[in-house]
């Protein structure tokens, strides 16, 4: 967790420890967030599409639960989760496909459940070269619209810019307590 910015750590930890019900670390990568949240007593498990990440996470954090899977097709029943952490896990989704994981998050969250989504911020939606694969910057406005289109209500948006680093953001949103018909 040494490379995690203090502001991000506080935001994620405060959200997760106040979330009622199971939490999914969607696109958990090497598993550091899953492990951190589990160490705080959160009922959490991580899912990632990359077998090497899951293998690393299982070896490095044997007390935490990790499963191989796609955020586009989660192995969770409808309404099973209290919260989902999507910390930069949708950055590789083409903008034309962004509603696929967002709709899947909405399907698996219970009414009133929350999503905390981290992203790279830009002045427009645009692709850029990332260490792993092409990634996308988003405006908060565009992500708000995509989240609202699948049923989320925006609670708050955080933005942070540091010299020499990519601007980043986080959006906290929730499903309505009573699903709309």
Image (cartoon, helix red, strand yellow):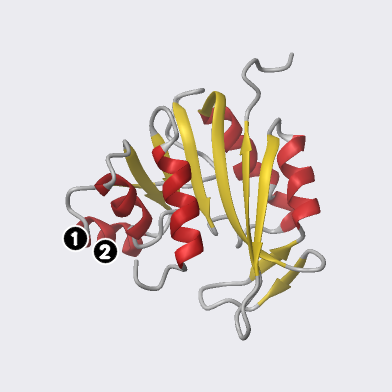
Mark 2 lies on residue: 56
Q: Secondary structure at mark 1?
A: helix
Residue closer to the observer: 6 or 63: 6
Snapshot quadrant of residue 119:
bottom right
Quadrant in which the N terminus appears: bottom left
Inspect this view and state whether residue 65 appears: no
Mark on residue 129? Answer: none
Residue closer to the observer: 144 or 71: 144
Snapshot quadrant of residue 127:
bottom right
Q: Position of residue 63 (x, y in %)?
A: 18, 48
Snapshot quadrant of residue 29:
bottom left
Horizontal side of 37 relative to 27 (left or right) equals left
Q: Disc 1, disc 2: CB below 8 Å? A: yes
Residue closer to the observer: 120 or 66: 120
**Residue, x 36% and y 47% (percent of image)?**
46
Vertically, is 16 above or below 77? below
Mark on residue 59? Answer: 1
**Residue, x 44% and y 59% (percent of image)?**
9
Quadrant in which the C terminus appears: top right
Vertically, is 152 above or below 133? above
Horizontal side of 154 relative to 145 (left or right) equals left
Horizontal side of 111 relative to 180 (left or right) equals left
Q: Position of residue 66 (x, y in %)?
A: 30, 48
Q: Position of residue 94 (x, y in %)?
A: 69, 59
Q: Secondary structure at mark 2?
A: helix
Inspect this view and state whether residue 35 appears: yes
Vertically, is 73 above or below 12? above
């Amino acid at each position: 967790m040494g490379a995690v910015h203090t502001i991000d750590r506080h935001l994620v930890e405060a959200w997760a420890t106040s979330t009622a019900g199971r939490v999914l670390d969607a696109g958990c990568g090497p598993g550091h967030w899953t492990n951190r949240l589990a160490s705080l007593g959160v009922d959490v498990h991580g899912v990632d599409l990359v077998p090497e990440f899951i293998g690393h996470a299982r070896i490095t954090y044997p007390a935490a639960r990790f499963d191989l899977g796609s955020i586009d097709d989660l192995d969770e029943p409808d309404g099973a989760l209290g919260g989902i952490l999507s910390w930069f896990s949708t950055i590789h989704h083409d903008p034309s496909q962004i509603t696929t994981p967002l709709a899947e998050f909405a399907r698996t969250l219970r009414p009133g459940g929350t999503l905390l989504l981290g992203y790279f911020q830009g002045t427009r939606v645009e692709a850029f070269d990332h260490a792993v694969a092409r990634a996308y910057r988003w405006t908060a406005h565009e992500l708000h619209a995509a989240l609202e289109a699948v049923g989320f209500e925006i609670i708050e948006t955080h933005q942070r810019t540091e010299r020499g680093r990519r601007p980043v953001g986080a959006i906290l949103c929730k499903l309505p307590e009573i699903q709309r018909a």
